[in-house]
Image (cartoon, helix red, strand yellow):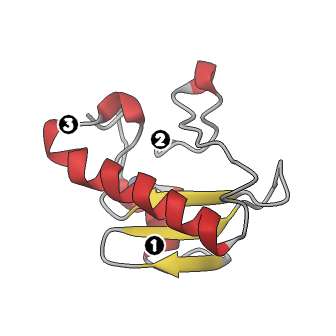
Amino acid sequence: MDGAPGFMEKDCPFCMIIRKEKPADFVYEDESVVVIKDIRPHAPVHLLIIPKRHIRSIHDLEEEDKDIVFDMILRARAMAREQSIAQAGYKLVFNTERGGGQVTYCVP
Ligand SMILES: [Zn+2]
């Protein structure tokens, strides 16, 4: 599913970051995910874990995406350790669609 009519993956802000067409503060990158610092942090450590495969929203997840979701969660755990917040605790948030606070869309 591609969202609104006229949607182009090339216009997806996250995909643009992954392709290095848009600046971001990279913290980590591998073949599956990238991790960047949020430009408007709501916590001392506020990172965005972005799958390299374009997935517009959690709502659009498909069966074949399960390894990517697992990679994202494992990466979150690793980043928490790296950022020294693993013991204190942290939360993982999936903002989903507008009502769930998803503000970055891959649609015009
Ligand atoms: Zn994308």
Provide the residue designation for mark 1.
18
Instruction: Name the quadrant containing residue 23.
Output: bottom right
The front one of 41 and 67 is: 67
| Position of residue 47 in the picture relative to residue 7 (left or right) | right
Q: Decide: is 20 above or below 40.
A: below
Circle 3 packing at 10 Å, graded few (<14), some (14-19), many (20+), is few
**In the rendered view of the protein, which quadrant contains the N terminus?**
top left
Q: Which residue is labeled 3 in the image?
A: 62
**First of labels 2, 1 by sequence position:** 1
Amino acid at the residue labelled 3: Glu
Mark 2, mark 1: which one is toward the viewer?
Answer: 1
- Residue type beneath disc 2: Val
Q: Residue furthest front?
A: 87
Residue 91 position, x and y percent, is: 65, 42
Q: Position of residue 5 (x, y in %)?
A: 35, 33
- What is the secondary structure assignment of the residue under circle 3? loop
Residue under the point 40% across and 67% down: 33
23 and 100: which is toward the camera: 100
Which residue is drawn at the image coordinates 52% and 58% (left, top)?
76
Where is residue 29, by image quadrant? bottom left
Residue appearing at x 65%, y 29% in the figure: 101
5 vs 84, left or right, is left
Question: Does residue 62 lie above or below 45 as drawn?
Answer: above
Mark 2 Cα-neighbour bin, 10 Å: few <14, some 14–19, many ≥20:
some
Mark 2 and mark 3: Cα distance apart in space: 19 Å
Q: Is mark 1 within 8 Å of ligand 1?
A: yes
Q: Which residue is mark 2?
A: 107
Q: Quadrant of ligand 1?
A: bottom left
Lower sequence index among marks 2 and 3: 3
State the SS at label 1. helix
Position in image of residue 17 (x %, y %)? 52, 70
